[in-house]
Image (spheres, grey):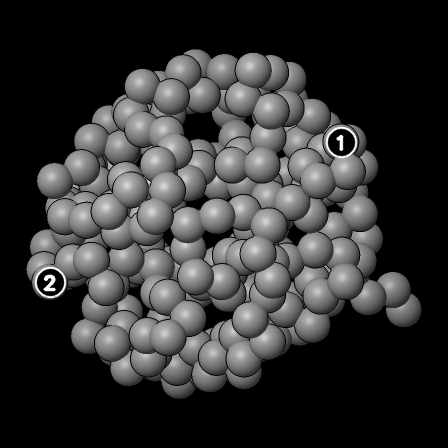
Amino acid sequence: MFEIAPSILSADFTRLAEEIAAVEAGGAKVLHVDVMDGRFVPNITIGLPVVKSIRAATDLTIDCHLMIVEPNRYAAEFVKAGADMVSVHVEADPHLQRTLTEIREAGGQAGVAINPATPLSSLEEALPFADFILLMSVNPGFGGQKYIHTSTDKLRRLRRMIDERALQTRIEIDGGIDASNIEKIVAAGAEIIVSGTGVFGKGNPTKGVKGLIEAATVWV
Ligand code: DX5
Ligand code: ZN
């Protein structure tokens, strides 16, 4: 029903393979990789060579979140480097339909990421070409930020938008999610839950993932 996608941005990069094995042991199915260029967002992180290395080290689904300008120049390259899912920001790409199609043609799942202040209406025409939407619940750029509370209502509206159109587009949500708020986020219709600090923050990523799964599961 839902999957936890640990964001390696909060992992210890000197021990990346161990950190990945630890989240897998906790039950994570997706690995969220934040690619930042210092232009679309005020931070620089990792790129294609690291994705290639991760691909060689794990069978988990690799989900690359491109926070870069001109994402069309690189999106398919990330699929070739080993990403299974690639998302590009609606704010960064005037030719979104083309980029999504190129990601799919390269064999990846194509996603559209959307910032907190960008209206959902900007997704409307792109929805049929997207395998998933990445709803940002913080302004992208850094881990460890506070969940923007209006995101839950935006998430419900996105859920409705997809269901009304009878689309299979999945919803991923990213930013400020931990054991304290994950339950309401899953209840509002999110299917892939990104968490960086919530997984790696306390130094035991296996426990971190398990804690999130438990917190999101309503026991009857
Ligand atoms: C923010 C990134 C997120 C970030 C999430 O720009 O897109 O994926 O790593 O980190 P937390 O869960 O700590 O907010
Ligand atoms: Zn992200």
Q: Quadrant of the N terminus?
A: bottom right
- Circle 1: residue type: Gly
Element carrying mark 2: loop
Residue 54 x %, y %: 45, 21
Q: Residue at x 70, y 55 (%)?
A: 178
Q: Quadrant of the C terminus?
A: bottom right
- Foreground: 40 or 194? 40
- Circle 2: residue type: Pro
Q: Label 2 belongs to which residue? A: 94
Residue 127's place in the image compared with 113, above or below, is: below
Other-residue count near label 2 (Cα within 10 Å), few / some / many at <14 / 14–19 / ≥20:
few
- Foreground: 181 or 105? 181
Number of numbered discs overlaid on the protein picture: 2
Residue 140 x %, y %: 42, 55
Q: Label 1 belongs to which residue? A: 203
Q: Is residue 83 left or right of residue 219?
A: left
First in residue order: circle 1 vs circle 2? 2
Q: Is the C-beta of the residue carrying label 1 under 8 Å from the nearest atom of ligand 1?
A: no
Image depth: mark 1 or mark 2 in front: 1
